Image (spheres, helix red, strand yellow):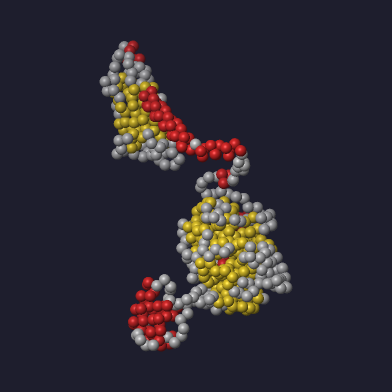
Amino acid sequence: MAAVSSSSSSSESNEANSKWLDAHYDPMANLYTFSSCIALADLHGDGEYKLVVGDLGMAGHTMRLKVYRGTGLASESTLLDLPSAVVTFLMDQNEPRTPAVAVTSGPFVYVYKNLRPYFKFTLPPLDANPLELDVWEQAKEDMIDPLTLKEMLEGIRDKAEIPLSVRSLRFLAQDVPEMENFVNLHKGQPIKRQTVITCMSTLKKNMADEDAVSCLVIGTESADVLILDPEAFTILAKMTLPSVPAFLDVMGQFDVEYRVTVACRDGSIYILRRESKRPKYCIELSAQPVGLVRVHKNIVAGCSDETLQGYTQKGKKLWTVYLPAPLMTMSLLDQKSRGFQAVMVGLANQEVHMYRDKNLVDIIRTQDVVTSICFGRYGREDNTLIMTTKGGGLIIKILKRTAVFEEKDTSLGPPVAQSIRLSVPKKTRLYVDQTLRERENAVAMHRVFQMDLYRLRLMAARAYVKALESSLVPVTSTLQEPLKMNAVVQGIGPTFKLTLHIQNTSAGRPSINLLVSFLYDQSLYAMKRAFFKAPMLVPGLNYPIETFVECLSDKGISDVIKVFVLREGQSMPLLTAHINMPVSEGLVAA
């Protein structure tokens, strides 16, 4: 009983410290989907938002379009193929203002109005390879046999720029006994080359309001981006990319100005603008993209190398965050009541991290690996977080009204205050005159600068030589091994105790394989150990090294003992010091 009470009290304390309320968890919901196939919308115009999910089903079967109301399933419709994206948008200005649901599947866009099939848009067919057409025409007239047809199609596939059609690819996959039947069955049919849709988003037509009419923006396997008219479903604009698009993010209005950000399979992000057939900017990522989110005017991309990277609209890199586990999915958290935006990242370690810029603001621990995230208004609650898991579970959480996210800079590098832009004053007349003077006298100013630089180097060299000759301070010969050494001489003679205090001043790298050597006049001094190996120097600790020096002269004179710290196997000393020995009073008195 005590164990049960302690575990229940700890869970209650964790829930009290959390910024989220656990509204619903159903591990047996059988929802298998991604973030691109989830949307929230007021489908019936009654102010109650519903959850629209494109369910992938089990092993490519039972694909369905499901609509959830509250915690239960309200309706579902059968899909003919695997969905790649689901969005909701307003098609027209007719009352009541109820949004339509667009589902992409294969080469088709299925549009549902009032959860009933309304329209089906089909991608226009692509031009077939003329060499492929000629080969099939010869096969149709029985001019070549199936084996010759196979050899010719393989040659076209390896060399031609235009890919083969689905029919030719299926023919090449057939076994030899089945090829003749395949040719006889299909040779009389025309050859069609069809592409498929990989991603989809929406773009406002001419107004920025939430209830404004929106166009559909789709990316295809043929590396094209198409913008569709919301009423006639005709192609308003077509743009070509260097690679196949995987994720889309769109902002602006089609009739005014818009910007399409596309993450492609070649590991790059391309930015398209209005009336541009080709990308205007290109961002090369460190790995394949896993997600793409726009936060205000910045672009945040999640990569397969467990990093989260931030960029400006023009492609300048701002920051990089290293994640503790592989990234599964990501989405935008937009708390409109407070103007707060953050990136939610689902990780493979059953955690959801929330980042504002590069700062970690919250961590949500889940019962399973999260595969899709959606944040927005659900039901009549504004700030609702909906997640689906790898095992098909459904998680619904509600953000507390008292929740405040605090930025915690967990990444290495400069502090957050360094990224705050300074208020640079405007250019004054004096600044402009000085700039013109520097531009007119650039050569003379450069010569003066070089002369002063040479003088500075000469003064530094002289000061270095003077320090060596006068034994003012131990000198380190290289910055790669930061060492500090002090020498203490004790005794009145003729035997002195010499103690060296050596310290490693680096941040976190120990020093090993170091040797200490003494150079002295053997007619004046004798040492028991003039060469020995130093221990490993841990950063920040002081290591005393003791030895004894015996003075051999009775004339009351003294000399300098030189100390060298060397790396084993190297002749160049890392540290050099000169020790002025005192006069031996014992021998003088004798």
Percent coordinates x, y for residue 37 in the rendering: 57, 69
Which of these two is toward me, 486 or 260?
A: 260
Which of these two is toward me, 581 or 217?
A: 217
User: At 53% from the left edge and 76% from the top edge, which residue is drawn?
Assistant: 124
Percent coordinates x, y for residue 531 in the rendering: 30, 31
Which of these two is toward me, 37 or 548?
A: 37
- The quadrant the C terminus occupies is top left
Instruction: Determine which quarter of the picture holds residue 542.
Output: top left
Relative side of 207 to 414, left or right: right
Percent coordinates x, y for residue 52 in the rendering: 62, 71
- The quadrant the N terminus occupies is bottom right
Which of these two is toward me, 426 or 303?
A: 426
Instruction: Determine which quarter of the picture holds residue 364.
Output: bottom right
Q: Is residue 159 above or below residue 555?
A: below
Q: Is residue 415 visible?
A: yes
Q: Is residue 28 visible?
A: no
Q: Residue furthest front?
A: 440
Q: Is residue 122 above or below residue 421?
A: below
User: At 56% from the left edge and 73% from the top edge, which residue is drawn?
Assistant: 104
User: At 55% from the left edge and 69% from the top edge, which residue is drawn?
Assistant: 238
Instruction: Determine which quarter of the picture holds residue 422.
Output: top right
